Image: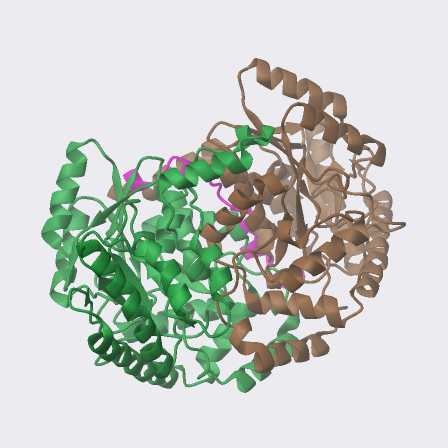
Chain colours: A green, B brown
Amino acid sequence: MTSEETTATVLTAETQAALDRAVSSTHRHEALFSDRAFHIKQSAVRDVFDISIRPGLISLAGGSPYLRSLPLAELGLSAQRIIAEHGLEALQYGAGQGMEELRIQACEVMAAEGITDADPADIVITTGSQSAQDVAAKVFCNPGDVVLCEDPTYVGALNAFEAYEVQMHALPVDSEGLVPEALEEAIASLRKQGKTIKMLYIIPSFNNPSGVTLAARRRPRIVEICARANILILEDNPYGMLRFDGNPLVPLRAGNPDDVLYLGSFSKIFAPGVRVGWALVPRHLHRRFYLACEAVVLCPSPLTQMLVSAYLRDYDWMQNIRDSRMLYASRCAAMLAALTEELPDGVSWTVPDGGFFVWLSLPEGVDTYPLLYEAIDAGVVFIPGAAFSPSDEPSNKLRLAFSAVSEEDIAEGVRRLAPVLRRAMDHAAG
Amino acid sequence: MTSEETTATVLTAETQAALDRAVSSTHRHEALFSDRAFHIKQSAVRDVFDISIRPGLISLAGGSPYLRSLPLAELGLSAQRIIAEHGLEALQYGAGQGMEELRIQACEVMAAEGITDADPADIVITTGSQSAQDVAAKVFCNPGDVVLCEDPTYVGALNAFEAYEVQMHALPVDSEGLVPEALEEAIASLRKQGKTIKMLYIIPSFNNPSGVTLAARRRPRIVEICARANILILEDNPYGMLRFDGNPLVPLRAGNPDDVLYLGSFSKIFAPGVRVGWALVPRHLHRRFYLACEAVVLCPSPLTQMLVSAYLRDYDWMQNIRDSRMLYASRCAAMLAALTEELPDGVSWTVPDGGFFVWLSLPEGVDTYPLLYEAIDAGVVFIPGAAFSPSDEPSNKLRLAFSAVSEEDIAEGVRRLAPVLRRAMDHAAG
């Protein structure tokens, strides 16, 4: 069970509210909660996952990276040296902005993706990318402000923004990613309604959960639309380096230092357990962003920053990424083959060029949430689509992750899932 | 330079606002900031500290713990084993609530302080205590809500709460800590003004910055007043174990599981660089608090949690605390002796029973902020008192930290400080 999994939200707002009232309405402290507290969603899937840890279950739910290829013995020695030789720095408070060496290395990582002009001074190291999303919501969004996002989008971002009473507005996506015309129309329509739009939150490469990538030719267009409308782009790019074939697509940030706040993460190209990410912040926004980061954690952990630094300095991290890409590509292929082999007509899915996820669409009218329990009974876990949408409508989609599961288990997991979906479709059709 | 230092805030609100306008008003993105962004204070002391790193300077500013007594070589080996043998867990995503082993150990730490009924299920491991303060503000406070605190209080808490547009209301403290009658009066008066009071934020043992401790006999009274007024107590107790003599004072939380949200930290009894603290949350508030924690960081770092766990499991941490207490006691004595020896009549200071800090009061009319620059010229650094107060009034107080400086340097630092204070007092008197 990973946190990424457990933040998935599947209860409807009504059910949540009822639960909340039942739990705490008897206590006089109920009156002490902030308004925003009621917008912080219940991670209902967590309970499911407590069940789902049982032996023999195959989890296609969690977006965990594959870590077995990391040189753990050597990394252990790196950590040992960091503490034995630099313990007074590693174990002490550090700078709020993060360590300079790591900020310089983050620039090197970004350069490998096509952002060649990043200045380490414009970077803030964050406690994972999640913390950067939380801070972005905090610094930019008043209650009721609108943040545009893709439909579907990352559940952790929904949770982070909705905790600040932000209205997440999901935009249609096709096989080439966010549709520019839909973006323009939504901006015009929301403004006509008097809404204040602050940001576009976007995962342009291998979206979580959909696996869809924003086509290269659409990228400048999206940036231009947002710049013209004075909407900041929050580009979340944890998977960008994990393109199966060819070079990474150039991020939106690349030629647009003023219009894009870029979020990077070491969770998928190194290890999530260090909780280290970074934000490359437009210079005119940097100070407030940085101060807000300091107010939430004082400083990121020097110890884990130094371990990431050592990994980037002393290991062939690019080769490890190349190996990871091949591994994930094989697993993705195994999943696509199993889906083709096993799933009934009427189910469709995305074909990702990278990342961790495939997104399934069932026929209209099938709600994937109740299927989760049936799937667990059948020995497989997925994440229902409703978790990835700001609306609390039932969803006929679901997310499968291939990142952390062997090809054999992927095939077996899909084999177990197939009859569950078939029954639900038969039932809906009947 | 530590983050704890750099969050100190000394610019007045007016100066900050002017600076902010100058920096960003030329950019169209200025309109994108949230209202709360303008309440996130500039860490002006940071600039001072960039100057202050110069060799030969003695810093009595930073509240850094002394780490040289930690068994760094052995801890390095512990980290090595954690990664080599349990790397797939340590480097992966973990549970949002934190690891069970560490939550159990946190209960053992609290038991040593007098909280004997804590249940690991009621704990959330946080990314340092700062993150718990941020989450508490988020979950409980609407803009304009009042949080009561001691005068003076921890600058990081002020920053965390004010970032949510909370009105921090500082209450008078005498040599026995927060004055119960003043608390009652403030509650009545603020309510008469129509204010909503949500919490009392309090550091009852060895307050940062004042070093003052809330007397044992006042503790039940404070809890009772708050309970009757339906005000939650947020008890911040990072220094509780670091009482120079005798047993730790029993925390407010001890007999009051429903009325106190207790914050613990491994920063002062182990190491701040791991960024691991914990919140013991009243059961009826736990779920919302925990969900908010997940929304800000997904999960605390399993790697650093496991290192803290190993430290508590495999080392004689209680002996290390006993050693630390003796060390801090000696340093505190050295500072008090130097103050007595060097400082002019008219300066008074607190005499702490534990913790890291001594709080100096200069005569009325002396503003300690401009003295900081003179002190740096004289080769010593302190934190001006204004940083520790929600008001932006000039302050005649200042904080000296003895925790991370040798007795020799403490004496020399005070020697350098004395003429700066004397000149300022002469000037004010003349």
> Is residue A235 found left or right of B359 in the rendered image?
left
Going by the picture, which residue comes out furthest to the right? B246
Going by the picture, which residue comes out furthest to the left? A181
Q: Residue at x 65, y 23 (%)?
A: B229
**The image quarter in which residue B127 lies:** bottom right
In the image, B196 versus B354, the foreground residue is B196
Q: Position of residue B293 (x, y in %)?
A: 51, 50
The answer to if A321 sits in the magenta stretch is no
In the image, B5 versus A415, the foreground residue is A415
Q: Residue at x 63, y 76 (%)?
A: B79
| Mark count | 0
Q: Is residue B242 visible?
A: no
Going by the picture, which residue comes out furthest to the top? B192
In the image, B251 versus B146, the foreground residue is B251
Q: Residue at x 30, y 63 (%)?
A: A399
**The image quarter in which residue A223 lies:** bottom left
Q: Position of residue B390 (x, y in %)?
A: 58, 32
Q: Is residue A326 above or below residue B181?
A: below
Q: Position of residue A394 (x, y in %)?
A: 28, 48
> Is residue A331 found left or right of B154 in the rendered image?
left
The answer to if B35 sits in the magenta stretch is yes
Q: Is residue B188 visible?
A: yes
Quick one: quadrant of the C terminus of chain A? bottom left
> Is residue A176 found left or right of B412 in the rendered image?
left
Residue stretch in magenta: B30-57
Q: Position of residue B346 (x, y in %)?
A: 80, 32
In the image, A248 versus A159, the foreground residue is A159
> Is residue A217 found left or right of B338 in the rendered image?
left
